[in-house]
Image (cartoon, rainbow, N blue to C red):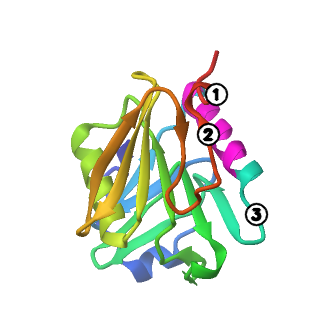
Amino acid sequence: MASLPNAKTVTYEEWLTMPEVQDAIEEVVNGEIRIMPPAKMIHTWIAQRLRKSLERQLDDTRVQVFPAEVALIIRKSPLTTRVPDISVFIVESMVEKNGYVESPPQLVIEILSPANTRKRQQEKLADYAALGVPEVWVVSPEARNVEILLLEDNQLRRSQILAEGFLQPKLFPNVQIDITQIWPD
C-alpha cells in the first residue's frame, strides 16, 4: 500500500471534488490518501467465492453484497475512509450521502495480503469498530483460516478462528459457507 508522493492531507470537502480512481482501490487514513496495489490471484479467487456464496444465499432485494468498490466513511475529520474486500448491508439500514456510505455494513470481510502489516490491520479493525460494524471476518489465505471478530463494548473482539466447518454470519443465520470451498484448489 502506497501513499501518494508528496501528498498533503485532504479534507472531506476536497476529497468529494476529486476524480474517481479507475482500476485502483483508494483509502484515506487521517487525511492521507493510500493507493492499494492490485490484488493477487488468490485474493481475487477467495473474494469471488465468498461474494458468490453470500449472494446465492441472501435476498438481494433486502441485502446487498458489495465487492471492494464501495468506500465507507469512517469519519470526516480527519478524513478516514475504508474499502473492505466485501461488505454486506441490509439495504434499509444503509445511509448514503454524496455517493458514499456513512453507515456500518452488517458484515465486513477482509482478505489478508502480504502488504497487510499487523499495525495497519489493527488500524483498519479499530476504524470498523468506530463505525459500529458488528462482525468482521479476517481471511488468511496463508494460514487457510478465518478469524471471526464481533463488536463488544465498541471493540472488535475475536470470537473464534476457523480452519474448517461453516462460516455463519450472526445477523444472517441462514447463511452457511463451507470454509473448504473458499480456497483455490
The residue range painted magenta reads: 42-54
Residue 70 within the segment the image draws in magenta: no
Residue 183 in the image: state x and y as whole percent. Answer: 58, 24
Q: Residue at x 72, y 44 (%)?
A: 52
Please name the residue shown 35% across and 51% down the image: 149
For the residue carrying disc 1, how many other residues have a C-alpha within 10 Å: few (<14), some (14-19), or many (20+)?
Answer: some
Q: Cβ–Cβ below 8 Å for labels 2 and 1?
A: yes
- The residue under the point 60% across, 26% down is 41
Please, is residue 135 above or below residue 91 in the view?
above
Residue 74, position as x, y percentages in the image: 37, 71
Viewer-nearest residue: 81 or 106: 106
**Helix or strand or loop: what does disc 2 sit on?**
strand
Q: Disc 2 designates what residue?
A: 177
State yes or no: residue 51 in magenta.
yes
Name the N-terminal-most of marks 2 and 3.
Answer: 3
**Can you tell which quarter of the image residue 62 is in?**
bottom right
Q: Is 88 rendered above or below residue 180? A: below
Is residue 12 placed above or below 9 in the rendered structure? Answer: below
Measure the C-alpha gap from mark 2 to mark 3: 16 Å
Q: Quadrant of the N terminus?
A: top left
- Amino acid carrying mark 3 in the image: Asp
Gap in angstroms between the C-alphas marked 2 and 1: 8 Å
Any part of residue 29 in sight: no
Give the amino acid at mark 1.
Answer: Gln
Q: Main secondary structure of the magenta part?
A: helix
Question: In whole angstroms, how far apart are the C-alphas of marks 3 and 1?
Answer: 21 Å
Q: Indicate the amino acid at tag 2.
A: Ile
Numbered mark located on residue 59 in the image? 3
- Circle 3 residues within 10 Å: few <14, some 14–19, many ≥20: few
Q: Secondary structure at mark 3?
A: loop
Label annotation for residue 181: 1
